[in-house]
Image (spheres, rainbow, N blue to C red):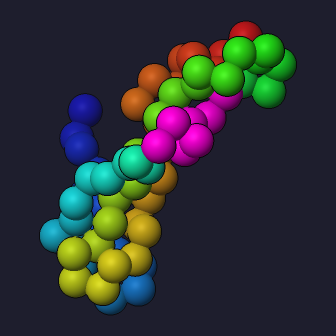
């Protein structure tokens, strides 16, 4: 499978850095979960202009029922 190149929609930059929230509050939990541990949200940040190009979780199957 070919990997998609992420491009900043604001400035067209292609140099991106991966980041995540510094605290556990930046986690997503299943809607029906009684636990608050969840999965961290990651971001791709454009190094040219600072735009958040993409946000995602690395284990989307966690949210499947």
Q: Is residue 27 visible?
A: yes
Where is residue 32? Give x, y as percent.
83, 19
Q: Quadrant of the C terminus?
A: top right
Q: What residue is drawn where x is 16% and y is 70%?
A: 15
Q: Report x, y in % for residue 48.
A: 22, 83
In the displayed structure, 59 sits above or below 48; it is: above
Reply above or below: 17 against 61: below
Q: Residue at x 58, y 41 (%)?
A: 25
Q: Is residue 12 visible?
A: no
The residue lying toward the viewer, choosing from 37 and 16, is 37
- For the record, the magenta segment spans 23-29
Report the residue at 29% width, 73% height from top. 46
Residue 6, horizontal then vertical, whole percent: 30, 61
Q: Is 10 above or below relative to 29?
A: below
What is the quadrant of residue 45 in the picture? bottom left
Q: Is residue 54 one of those drawn in magenta?
A: no
């Amino acid at each position: 499978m070919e990997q998609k190149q992420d491009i900043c929609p604001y400035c067209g930059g292609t140099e991106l850095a991966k980041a995540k929230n510094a605290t556990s509050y930046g986690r997503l939990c299943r809607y029906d979960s009684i636990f608050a541990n969840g999965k961290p949200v990651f971001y791709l940040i454009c190094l040219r202009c600072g735009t958040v190009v993409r946000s995602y979780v690395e284990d989307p199957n966690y949210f499947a029922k």
